[in-house]
Image: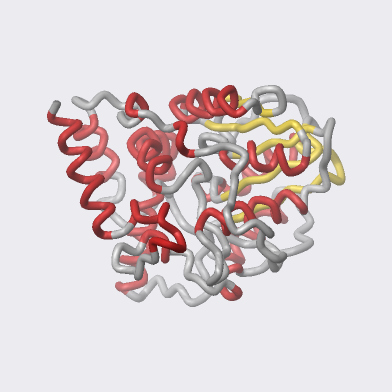
Amino acid sequence: PRDPPLPPPPTSRRAKMASKASGLKMRHMGGNIDSKESAKATKEYGEYFAEEDDSKRTGNYADVVNKYYDLATSFYEYGWGESFHFAHRYKWETLRESIIRHEHYLASKLNVGPGQKVLDVGCGVGGPLREIAAFTGASITGLNNNQHQVERGREMNKATGRHDTCDFVKADFMNIPGPDASYDAVYQIEATCHAPDQVACYSEIFRVLKPGGVFASYEWCLTDEYDPDNAEHRKIRQEILLGNGLPTARYTSEVLDNMRKAGFEVTEEVDLVKSADVTWYEPIDPYRVWVPWRDFWSFKTTLWGRAITHYLVWVLEAV
């Protein structure tokens, strides 16, 4: 993820989001795939990553990404929350606090307010768009090509009262519906990394953005330290692609160049990893030290939490 240095954390020590993950109910746990089809879908998804060559995945990016989110969305909500992204984090923050700050900072760069229209490209179930709509007062449309996530997002909008200022459209970000210059601002959070052709994707975003509008982005990038000739580096890259439904991964320089090719002027960029106190992958490290009185909510991603989830799902599949 890339963006300028971040401001102080929220003043409240108990982070409250515009919507809550408690809306996840047992009927949602099956995701968008029938239990009898889950093994087949998991196998087909895994086959896309059997080889390091990205061409099969980029050529079938919509199927790769849809299979991933059909399988994983319920687990994201259960174990992570409604905002499906990592966050720049200080050592005195909980994961939820860092996620809220991450979203508020991005929102502060959009220069929008009540009465203005914003597009969230690759919005997931809408956790960020509800938070950013509450923070800015703007009306936000979430663009998503996964039907299950769109339906879940609409349910959450109604449950939280955000349906008046937040909506969803099911569409591919490679072909965004709507006329040119439709939105006052556009943002994406770890979404356009799924694009098979990033220049074409950014060009679509540039097309629907009003002249002078801001496109703010947190993007997955390979650093210059990545060595394609190093087998261990390639292994880690492949595991990240598999674990996040990514068809490919690009160097930071490639991403910035792709933005410029699409017509954007890049005014700010920074590697957030360098200024974070806590590594981006710490929340999903099962062997980390868990401090229940500081962040009880994160128990689900610990070794014991994962084991409980595993056997719970096993029981649910058996009944």
Of residue 147 and residue 137, the one placed in the foreground of this image is 137
Q: Residue furthest right?
A: 212
Indicate the position of residue 190 as horizontal and vertical percent values: 54, 50
| Residue beneath the point at 33% across and 36% down | 71
Task: Say how the picture is coloured.
Answer: secondary structure
Q: Is residue 271 left or right of residue 7?
A: left
Indicate the position of residue 201 as horizontal and vertical percent values: 61, 42
Indicate the position of residue 103 as horizontal and vertical percent values: 64, 51
Q: Quadrant of the C terminus?
A: top left
Q: Quadrant of residue 180?
A: top right
| Residue beneath the point at 78% across and 48% down | 110
| Residue beneath the point at 75% across and 63% down | 268
Q: Is residue 212 left or right of residue 134?
A: right
Look at the image and tell me whether residue 175 can be seen.
yes
Q: Quadrant of residue 178?
A: top right
Q: Is residue 189 left or right of residue 61?
A: right
Whether residue 255 is situated above or below residue 270 in the rendered picture: above
Indicate the position of residue 101 as horizontal and vertical percent values: 64, 56
Of residue 180 and residue 123, the one placed in the foreground of this image is 123
Of residue 176 and residue 277, the one placed in the foreground of this image is 277
| Residue beneath the point at 52% across and 23% down | 155
Q: Is residue 214 left or right of residue 30?
A: right
Whether residue 214 is situated above or below residue 23 in the rendered picture: below
Q: Quadrant of the N terminus?
A: bottom right
Q: Quadrant of residue 168?
A: top right
